[in-house]
């Protein structure tokens, strides 16, 4: 079965890792999570920990949250089991070479040394393990390709639709990481036609959960969260239906563009806001069919994640396991 390689070029040899478990860390705009993951892509029971993040947190508070969850997971490492490596998925942009992150939705962190922060926390507990950092969207793509809905697919994109919108790409069986490590950042694509002014407008600013709720609120919606919007949509509230339709249409238009460029077979979508309604996938499909100029681009299949909420952590672990 074809497998995506994190190091597709012969000039960049894959690092070697000892046997053992992987510490997986997923850092995003709402939360940071960590867990130990085995070589089958299974989270080790009792090793998963979570801490909120968010715009209101200071740089030191965010760093403390990361260290807290990573330390807690490492303290649950079974006796006699080594730490094979550390995989970190993070909202971007990132600096792959230096291990830095500058999450769009967390202004307190600009060029923050996330990779070294996690590695140092591990060293404090006696684990001198190699650490690798990549975009969270790429991690979810690796997870789906490894053990999820995209298993064995050579040409696919994974997407997260949540507080933000992220993505990652596998093309011809190889991971597309890009020059700086930010390839696949679909949430930052410009999607014109969704605002009344000629100003920059990204997919994330249209389709992410908080932005969709804000758009609905500006038109009279009284709810405050994506869950409120989901309930209103189920009750066929006019504003909620319009907001979700707008979000799904923008996602479909962006997928149509990427599929035209990369000739994708499959797009797998996860993240909390992707669960707003099962209708979201029908809306996305309709937009792809409408905005794709060529039949090959319309052939792309779009499906929900096969990994529920475990995907980002499994994908972070895949940064280690799938690089071999």
Image: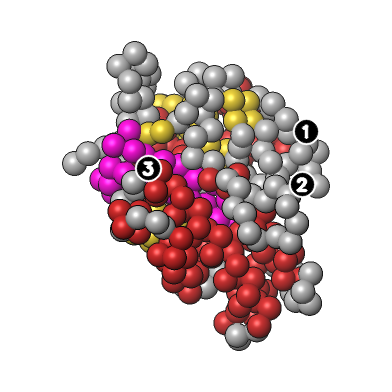
Check contact, mark 2 vs mark 3: CB within 8 A: no
Q: Which mark is residue 55?
A: 2
Q: Which mark is residue 60?
A: 1
Query: Which residue is most to the top?
Result: 11
Q: Position of residue 166 (x, y in %)?
A: 54, 46
Check residue 291 for magenta coloring.
no
Marks 2 and 1, how far apart at CA = 13 Å
Residue nearer the viewer, 26 or 1: 1
Left or right of 187 on screen, residue 324? left
Q: Secondary structure at mark 2?
A: loop
Within 10 angstroms of label 2, few (less than 14), some, or many (20 or more) residues?
Answer: some
Q: Earlier in the sequence, mark 1 or mark 3?
A: 1
Give the extent of the magenta segment.
150-174
Label 3, on which residue?
Answer: 262
Check residue 162 for magenta coloring.
yes
Tell us which disc is closer to us: 2 or 3.
3
Q: Residue at x 52, y 73 (%)?
A: 277
Q: Earlier in the sequence, mark 2 or mark 3?
A: 2
Q: Residue at x 58, y 45 (%)?
A: 189
Tell us which disc is closer to us: 1 or 3.
3
Q: Residue at x 46, y 42 (%)?
A: 168
Tell us which disc is closer to us: 2 or 1.
2
Residue nearer the viewer, 134 or 263: 263
Left or right of 93 on screen, residue 258? left
């Amino acid at each position: 079965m074809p497998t995506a390689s994190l190091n597709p070029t012969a000039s960049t040899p894959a690092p070697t890792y000892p046997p053992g478990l992987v510490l997986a860390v997923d850092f995003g705009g709402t939360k940071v999570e960590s867990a130990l993951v085995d070589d089958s892509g299974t989270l080790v029971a009792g090793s998963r920990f979570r801490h909120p993040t968010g715009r209101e947190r200071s740089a030191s508070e965010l760093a403390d949250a990361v260290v807290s969850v990573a330390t807690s997971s490492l303290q649950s490492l079974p006796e006699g089991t080594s730490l094979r490596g550390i995989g970190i998925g993070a909202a971007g942009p990132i600096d792959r070479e230096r291990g830095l992150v500058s999450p769009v939705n967390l202004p307190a962190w600009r060029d923050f040394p996330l990779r070294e922060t996690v590695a140092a926390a591990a060293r404090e507990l006696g684990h001198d393990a190699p650490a690798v950092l990549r975009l969270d969207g790429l991690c979810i793509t690796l997870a789906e390709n490894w053990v999820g809905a995209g298993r064995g697919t050579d040409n696919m994109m994974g997407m997260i639709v949540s507080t933000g919108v992220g993505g990652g790409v596998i093309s011809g069986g190889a991971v597309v990481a890009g020059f700086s490590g930010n390839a696949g950042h679909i949430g930052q694509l410009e999607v014109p036609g969704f605002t009344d002014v000629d100003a920059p407008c990204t997919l994330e600013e249209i389709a992410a959960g908080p932005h969709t709720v804000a758009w609905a609120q500006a038109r009279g919606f009284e709810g405050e969260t994506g869950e409120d919007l989901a309930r209103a949509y189920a009750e066929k509230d006019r504003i909620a239906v319009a907001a979700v339709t707008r979000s799904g249409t923008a996602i479909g238009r962006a997928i149509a563009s990427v599929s035209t460029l990369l000739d994708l077979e499959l797009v797998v979508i996860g993240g909390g806001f992707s669960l707003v309604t099962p209708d979201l996938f029908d809306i996305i499909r309709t937009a792809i069919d409408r905005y794709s100029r060529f039949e090959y681009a319309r052939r792309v299949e779009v499906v929900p994640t096969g990994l529920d909420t475990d995907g980002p952590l499994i994908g972070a672990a895949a940064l280690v396991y799938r690089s071999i």
